[in-house]
Image (cartoon, helix red, strand yellow):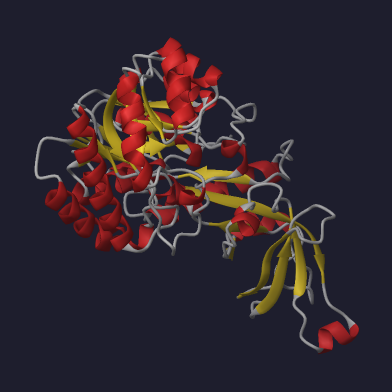
Amino acid sequence: MAPLSAPSEAVTTGKIIHATGYRNLSPDELVDLAIESHIVHIVKRSVVGGDESFFIADLGQILRQHRRWTQHMSSIRPYYAVKCNCDPTFLNVLAELGTGFDCASIEEMRAVLSLGVDPARILFANPCKAPAAVAFAREVGVLRTTFDNIDELDTIKTHMPEAQLLLRIYANDEGAFICLGDKFGAQLDTTEELLSRAWELGLNVIGVSFHVGTGATNPSSFCKAIKDARLAFSQAERLGFHLKILDIGGGFQDDCFEAMAPIIRDAIRSEFPAGITTIAEPGRLFARSVYTLVCRVISRRRQLGSAARSGVPDMLYQNDGIYGNFMNVIMEKETMVPYLVKSKKARGFLHKPKQGDALQVTNHRYSIWGPTCDSTDCVVREVTLDSEVKIGDWLKYKNMGGGFRHFILGISTELTELQHIQVPRPLSSMASAAPMTHFMSIVKRCLAISWCSAEGICGLGFIGMGVAQSLA
């Protein structure tokens, strides 16, 4: 990785070093600067793997999202849903911020525990677990877990009788793009029987959980689920259980979070006046906007003949598709929005037009396809870009941090060595009291844009220092 040139001067505010040349850059500008630097590096030096797509992670965005949470959900502790994105760098920042973790598998528990996280900060939030997974949780000290059926109670009794259980009840937002209620959650007409069975087995039920679905937009779905949880609490208390935790799950959307938060808070206060701990399982709210995916155009097909006359868009082929990091195009019908990387420096390395062969800076319509031979491997059916795109150009896609392939499969073999930047104090008022360790990297072609002055003063032009100065 080639470091950026050092700014003309650097200043220290408190114990955070700022590069004055970067101080006024917005987060988006810092991301673009990182993209440019990496592209120049791999193109200029013919880096092996230079034709692969890569991610840029703005770790400062984690702090901004965490701050949003504490501003609007201060009484609700987040347990980040690791299934959404298990990049160790990302998880480590959340761990430093004091979040809990919602794990759904052995692999996810291992990933979190490897960071030194206390098992008490982990909820094994999978109501239908393999016996081996329950035994593993007991072995490593992760005792809090969920259930929603009789057989699960028998499994837990056999393999982890000292478990601290949360009853997962049915909840559903019909507008969510993934309805988890189809797979998990006990209906209210079954909860009393489940609780009675737990009591007979001598198990310890400590709370109730629900999840209204991924991408929830209707606050009334949360309100109904909270009312249902109150009924389940009452059933448990009549049996003799002493419940103390309400888990409201995840599904929070970035664009309506501030609008929904007060409605959820009021519903909790109404049904649970005092005496319980409320937690939640945000995933994409924290992860999605942190990552930008950058793909290279590897081929182009310009329309000719009748197709051109009828206005069929030209076709671009890039080095990533639905079998890679664009699976949500198929799974969730997500609309991808590409942006052409327009850095003059980066594009200059890719194609230096001869006279009469200049790039056309006018609107061009394209469809964008992945690299496989599968005709369904289409990332974007049609998009208008404000400049011609040629082979070797790069396209960036924002908000790609939620559920991309390497994280979903739990693959860590493509993580390269991490660079560590020690920040001597927390970067925001919501950070933990311990010193903050910033890990600057990305998954698959890890990247940290840094500089070091002649005096030995080191700083970052991307991810952390430049971003963190606005949060300190």
In this rendered view, identify the residue nearer to me: 179 or 448: 179
Is residue 196 visible in the rendered image? The answer is: yes
- For the C terminus, which image quadrant? top left
Image spot of residue 78 (x, y percent): 30, 39
Q: Is residue 118 above or below residue 394?
A: above
Classify 195 as above or below 312. Answer: above
Q: Position of residue 184 (x, y in %)?
A: 47, 43
Q: Nearer the viewer, residue 352 or 58?
A: 58
Give the residue displayed 77% in from the left and 69% down from the top. 315
Residue 222 is drawn in which quadrant?
bottom left
Q: Is residue 308 above or below residue 264?
A: below
The residue located at (57%, 59%) in the rendering is 343
Q: Residue furthest left?
A: 274
At which x and y percent is residue 170? 39, 48
- Which residue is the extreme one toward the right? 305
- Which residue sits at x=70%, y=46%? 43
**What quarter of the picture does the N terminus occupy?**
top right
Is 301 above or below relative to 432? below
How many labels, in total? 0
Q: Is residue 243 visible?
A: no
Residue 55: % across, % down: 56, 44
Residue found 46% across the figure and 24% down from its top? 109
